[in-house]
Amino acid sequence: MTSSLQPVPRKAELLLLVLFLLSLPILNPWVRGDGVGYYAYARAPLIEHSLDFTHDYQQANASFRENRLDENGQPTAAFRTRTGHLENHFTVGPAVLWAPFLLATHAGVLLARSFGSAIPADGFSMPYLIAMALATALYGFLGLLISFQIARKYVDQTWALLATLAIWWASSLPVYMYFNPAWSHAHSAFVVALFLWYWHETREARSLGQWILLGALAGLMLNVYYANLMLFAILPFEALRDYGAAFRKATPSTPSVAQLLARHAAFAVTLVLCLLPTFIAHRIVYGGIFETGYGSVSQWNWGSPYLLSVLFSSNHGMISWTPILLFAVIGLVAFWRSVPRVGGAFLLAASAFYYFIASYPDWAGISSYGSRFFVSLTALFVLGLAVFLDRFTRIFRRRGAALGASCVFLACFVLWNAGLMFQWGSHLIPARGPISFPQMIRNQFLTVPRQITSQLGTYLFRRKAMMQQIEQRDLEQMKESPPSQ
């Protein structure tokens, strides 16, 4: 299997775009849970020109406000940092990506108000929330589009397209692309895909300017999600080969050791400069650029990571909740064996990310659909699944039979995921902690078919009331069975 140049699949891209546009009615413009912290980094500077998150926390959902606010609705002292700011350990990267959309929306709201509109220019009114949700969905879609472009370089575009559609709708991505758009995971899928794509496109001979741009993309990737640091594993994998070639002077055009050092230094400097939004926010909120609000990594389970639980636990296991990813992982291993230079780098990056999450004390993600952390690896999953389909379909003599079998195979996972997302969103299963697999399976075949149609109508046309009911059920479940790790 080798990289090949194929005609740009305009029809495939157009199909993906049409499906994306048709999916927009399911966008859920709300800010809830972790999303409160992410959105606060965008709203507070835009509206209040500061990093005072008091109003953001006061407007938050009840389960987020709990313990952060007292009986009078004022922030408790326990959630004040040494600089006097409210604790906010969430990343600033999503706010950076939302900024163009929210700035345009704010200008529009102010203009409308000058003509007599009563829409509040507070960052909480619906125009702002719609802009935020639409931006998140767009970034998620761009991540899928980039993932498709990577995959089609190695397999027939049909399998790349089917893999893209399957990961789009049979993984945890749709929850964080549409239902919880204020969380960071769809943004992370986008920036990781962009970083991997650019690394891949420039890997043969990366100039100084390209190293600088790669550093900027790396900085954006870390601004969005700290765990994306593990994707840097592809760089030493590449550097070992490059420095070996430089010492041997493999070809006249091979960069010298000094040139490589200069390029890597430019990458590092650019990376640090692009992390300034994070450093500045940490300095203001916590008093130090390297303070994050998270516990010390020295307390993580590095020596005894939850390697199997992360994959198979009923407590948001990656494969037990989103089984399509098993075949994506198989395909990623097959890709490494076929294209070791690229596949080895990608598999190493995915393995490093996996070990990092498995070592994290809250590896299950607390309130999570599946293992939400792995949404970051969307591009690798699309590639892996595309390779799996390419191998799987070779058992068929006719292309039509291969295509039909693949569609049926993938549709089963999409339908299963739709039912499980419905169970999770409507709290037929707990949003936190382990679930009962027998109960979940019974619900899939008995409860979901009876309820999903009517609930979909409610979601589309009476969403506000439905979200209030979901929040109330969440509070009740938290009281009945508080989360434990």
Image (spheres, rainbow, N blue to C red):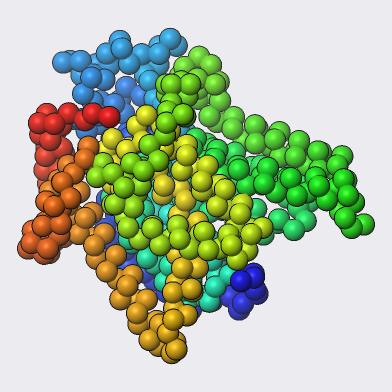
Residue drawn where x is 59% and y is 29% of the image: 276
Residue drawn where x is 38% and y is 20% of the image: 87
Residue drawn where x is 70% and y is 35% of the image: 268
Q: Is residue 30 left or right of residue 482?
A: right
Q: Quadrant of the N terminus?
A: bottom right
Q: Position of residue 157 (x, y in %)?
A: 51, 75
Foreground pick, 309 / 270:
309
Q: Position of residue 401 (x, y in %)?
A: 38, 86
Q: Position of residue 349 (x, y in %)?
A: 56, 47
Foreground pick, 30 / 295:
295
Foreground pick, 478 / 28:
478
> Can you tell which quarter of the image residue 90 is in?
top left
Please indicate, yes or no, whether residue 30 appears anywhere in the rendered image. Answer: no
Of all residues shown, which one is farthest toward the right?
252
Q: How many marks?
A: 0
Foreground pick, 231 / 54:
231
In the image, residue 442 sits, relative to residue 237, either above or below, namely below
Q: Quadrant of the C terminus?
A: top left
Q: Position of residue 28 (x, y in %)?
A: 27, 50
Residue drawn where x is 45% and y is 48% of the image: 376
Q: Is residue 417 left or right of residue 12?
A: left
Please indicate, yes or no, whether residue 417 appears anywhere in the rendered image. Answer: yes
> Can you tell which quarter of the image residue 299 is in?
top left
In the image, residue 141 sits, relative to residue 87, either above or below, namely below
> Can you tell which quarter of the image residue 252 is in?
bottom right
